[in-house]
Amino acid sequence: MKVLCGYNVNIDAVCRMTGEEISDLLGMVNKEELREKICEPPGEIRSLSDFVAGMVLHMQKGTGGEWFINSDEFFHFLKERYYEKSEIRLGGNMGIMANVMSHMGAEQVVMNAVGDINSIKPLMSGGNIVFAGESIPQDGSISEDATEIIHFVFDFSSGTRFNVLGAEVTVPRENRFIATYDDINTELTITTEFEEYSSEHVSEMDGAIISGFNQLQKFYTDGFGYEERFEKAYSQLRGWKELNPDLLIQVEFGHFMSMGMGVFIFTELAGTVDSIGMNEDELVMLSELHGVPSDMIRKMDACAILDACVRCASSTGLKKIVLHTRDFMMSIFGKGASSPALEIESMQFGVMCAAAFAASGRLPERSQLGDSVTGLARSEEGLKQITRLQDLIGGEELEGGVCGEYQEYSVCILPTIICEEPVSTVGLGDTVSSATFLRWLELSAAYQ
């Protein structure tokens, strides 16, 4: 398979946020200031109290999130405190997905190579990658440290305990909070080389997997908003479809700065791309479209998630949604967009890749994929949710999953494979989405 891959890549500095570490940070901030920011989250990081408030909020709920660092001074604080003791990994949705697909057997992956790609290349294990654009020019609009494109990823574990403002907190589930310092991906930068290469070769491509829209900012220093940056990328996707109507395009959604941004971008993309992948937190951001209570979605109630996905798809005309959670993976699609057998087989491949990566922090060779997850079990909670959903959709069992119908959509769901002590949770959504997409492309070509 030949795949186009845009737009964001960076370096992840992955660090474990323990109860002791968050307690130390809590001791460094003003309590009243922290209380105000927990009650009214700033959603961005300009100071230590902003960072601690974000960290506490996501650890309390066990949810994943990403806030942008808008202070050079605080970036240097984080870098000095955590960078040397972090595990340095490939980051960015596009970077991770390009690496997964290349490693797992794609013939060619064409990647939008932004930033200091020479520092990023050694972190990639896959071959057959075309780096379209080795670097971007520097000018006064980009700060001195911007080419580092460092995203600090703070993993936290279920059961971690700490006290905040007189209350004891026990983290309900493992997840991560990301503090992002990035002046390149926030622009949704597309290299000239990627534009030219993709236009010239799109007719040869089987698919495209696109991400990075969640890096967009509400406002920019030039006075424009995110809509202008989005439109440049969106016009590229439309152009690809015009040149190659058979090109299958999937977008990996991401956590946006505001619900309004998420709804706008989802709605715009829905009429052009073939599928959109997301997790439960990102589905919550689309509540304006589906109206399903967020607490039901965050509890990973499969019936509520299905209802929300169908409402999002039916209100926008989107052909398919691929929803990945800790405990199960679900695909809902309209008539002619796919088939139950294709969806189940491709999702099985995806969850195996994600489990292997969670257990070891690296991808196995494709021939060793089955052996790499030996000893890991299917999620018990996922199995329970599938039983509940089966009652709703009247589905039949198929290769370890269940397929059925809900309203005018086909539904496929299967349990994930759980690693109780993952090396890291970062990149698992990108891994499962891109591996599933790769297998979907292979099977789609085989079934034609």
Image (cartoon, rainbow, N blue to C red):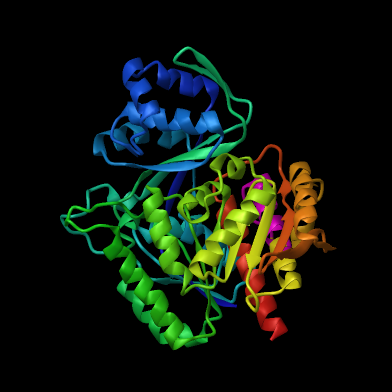
Q: Residue at x 72, y 58 (%)?
A: 413
Magenta stretch: includes residue 389: no
- What number of labels is visible? 0
The x and y percentages for residue 39 are 39, 27
Name the side, left or right, on which 136 lies relative to 404.
Answer: left
The x and y percentages for residue 13 are 45, 42
The x and y percentages for residue 359 are 68, 45
Q: Residue at x 35, y 27 (%)?
A: 37
Q: Which residues are magenta?
A: 348-364
Name the side, left or right, on which 307 lies relative to 388.
Answer: left
Rendered position, 344 above or below 377:
below
Q: Nearer the viewer, residue 372 or 242?
A: 242
**Visible in this render: residue 369?**
yes
Rendered position, 167 above or below 178:
above
Rendered position, 243 above or below 390:
below
Q: Residue at x 45, y 49 (%)?
A: 255
Q: Nearer the viewer, residue 227 or 10?
A: 227
The x and y percentages for residue 322 are 61, 61
Q: Nearer the viewer, residue 374 or 257?
A: 257
Q: Nearer the viewer, residue 380 or 310?
A: 310
Q: Quadrant of residue 340?
A: bottom right
Name the side, left or right, on which 263 lies relative to 100.
Answer: left
